[in-house]
Amino acid sequence: MVIEKILKEKFGLSKFRPNQKKIIKSILDENDTIAILATGGGKSLCYQLPAVMFKGITIIISPLIALMQDQVKNLNQKSINATYFSSTLSKKETQDRFEKLSKNRYKIIFVAPERLNNEKFKSIISKLKIEFIAIDEAHCISQWGRDFRPSYRTIGKFIKEMNISRVAAFTGTATFNVVEDIKKFLNLKNTEIFKSTFDRPNLKYVALKCKKQTDKIALLNKILKQISGSGAIYCATRNSVEMVGELLREWHYSVGIYHAGLTSVQRNTMQRKWINGEILIIVATNAFGMGIDKPDVRFVIHYHMPGNMENYYQEAGRAGRDGKSSYCIALYSPDDKIIQEYFINSKYPDIEVVKNKYSEIENEQIIVDEKIIENPAIRLLLDYNYIENIDGIFCTVSDKQISEIEIKLGSIVKYRENLIARLNKTISYFEDFICRRRVILEYFEENYMFLSCGGCDSCLKWKVEDIKNDNLPNDDEINFSIDLINFIYNELEKNKTVNRKILQEKIISNFIKIDDFSLKDLNLIVSIAISELIKLNIIKKKIFFNELYLTEFGLECIKKQYIPSIDIIIFQRYKYMKHLETFSDWLIKFLESKNVNELNKSQIYDIVIQQNISFDELELITEWNENDMFNFGINIKNALEDVSKDHLDGIYLQLITLLEEHKSRDEIEHFLKIDDNIFNRLENNIKKSNKSISNIEIKG
């Protein structure tokens, strides 16, 4: 209860996000803790709230000066005394803060990792009660991480010297190798590891390949006409930010720009206006976005491909933090690779470049400012503690020999090679037309629980032409679908079984106020949603009792907070089925030709119209033999070819698709929920009747 009280009184929040409370409890219990929370997961609260509860001081290590400044400002507004130390502070500012720190005036202090090498800082800290140290952006400690910083390797030594008992590391993305490095270099023992799912079902991933710059511009124009709301467009260079920003102004959008070439006042002004909704779209380099929690971002567009999957996931993940449907669209061209290779080589320069910069500092006065501190050679010299800020001037550290740096920079060269390899992995995400969500989750070593995500251009079979032809779904429609799926989840979680009719009535009464849909349309949408969840094996129905229940797989999905991204599919099928009058006429005639009685005709019609034809149901209802059912499926397919080739998922047609995709027998049986006997019968009939796949070998 104490935790909840502080959450409400100090942070103005009524409830925790997933895993936050567990992470905080682990820290309070003095467990070494690693928290991997995806963008929007609420990392900062996990170290700020415990810091408020402790009597002593909390140190938070961060490599991002802008993020430190922003968090200190927010904490002070909450009457929590906080400050930060960075190499951009003047000698007087640093001295003033040291004096206040020595007098216990601060509850929380933010420091850049290189500060831990400062003897004066260590001398003051050693005399204070440090209860907790939090390492933000902890992936920087690993050469497997997306932004390796050598200075992070000194943190473990500092923790040991200061005898700090509570340690927690935070990152938005981390593979197994990164986690192992975090534990190793921070000397963590018996570590509690908390990892949220990387799946964001409300995000729709689209990657579109463009041959040249003019194609990107034309496609961007089309996309912006189809999506509404607040958004961010990421560009690789300052020039492209300026160019895209100017284009959007010409197209009469409310737009601002953000890049490192602007002054801090200009950047802060643009950021504030975008967060407050004074401008609708922000065009920015990847310098933008860290620490921003704007919930209502409806789209993130990448005008250029990012350098690695971690950056792409972090930047794209700034969309849809309010849980509503949002788009993550990337425009990729082959030239993007050249840009990213240049950035990698520039950010991690050759040893000679670093040595030349050191000589320059020895012989000239280089004034410290925000721009010069981001120079890659300066950054490395600071990380390795070869230079320091004295009275606003960079000076060499007296007890260091530049000749030693060659050995230390050897790791940077290896890291640069690692980044190039990861860039090539990123290219495959954009070039291969496979499930985008699955690629993202597998990159972060997370298994995706569904064969198809239903929420990316690959699974929805979108192509560039579809975007050009104004085919992106309406936001209100798909947000309604998300609410509907959550409602069905909640109802089935509360009850072991639910009568389908009663469930539909409950849903209708809950959503009937939605003006855009008639009662008939709403019933149709609900039927489609239930059918889609049945196809995914999340729920099943007892045929003779018309009751629905959660499968074991469905219970596992709820436990792991997996929600299928089927909201677009629901509305695509709803719209499609609204155009099926001619098909309905054909189906009635077809059923009559099979001498099906009225009751069974009605049942079959409902099953087919809802596109949930199942082998078991057809067999039970019709008593048809396999050839009858196969012909039934083929006739339906033929009747629908003029309308759509992708919308009917009969059991035979699903099998044909899976065979053509070279799925293994186990994958097919799992997907269709059939046993070996049924599989063999289906396979034989399909191969006899479809010459194009008769020679496909099925993997065991």
Image (tube, rainbow, N blue to C red):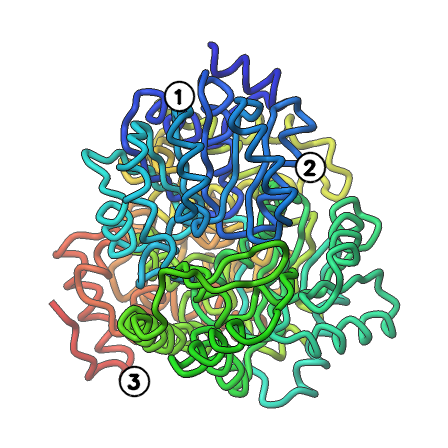
What amino acid type is highlighted by mark number 3?
Ser
**Nearer to me, 567 or 645:** 567
Q: Which element carries disc 1, helix, strand or loop?
A: loop
Q: Nearer the viewer, residue 685 or 45?
A: 45
Where is residue 121? Give x, y as percent. 45, 40
Q: Which residue is label 3 attached to?
A: 692
Q: Where is residue 295 drawn, in percent x and y? A: 65, 43
Q: Which residue is mark 2?
A: 519
Residue type at numbered disc 1: Asn
> Label 1 vs label 2: CA separation?
25 Å
Instruction: Report the amino acid beneath label 2.
Output: Leu
**Mark linked to residue 85:** none
Who's the residue at 67% across and 36% down the image? 73
Mark 1 and mark 2 lie on one chain; the one further toward the N terminus is: 1
**Residue 34 in sight here:** yes
Q: Are marks 3 and 2 in contact (CB under 8 Å)?
A: no
Q: Earlier in the sequence, mark 1 or mark 3?
A: 1
Which mark, residue 495? 1
> Badge 3, how many Cα within 10 Å: few under 14, some, many 20+?
few
- Nearer the observer, disc 1 or disc 2? 1
- Mark earlier in primary sequence (3, 2): 2
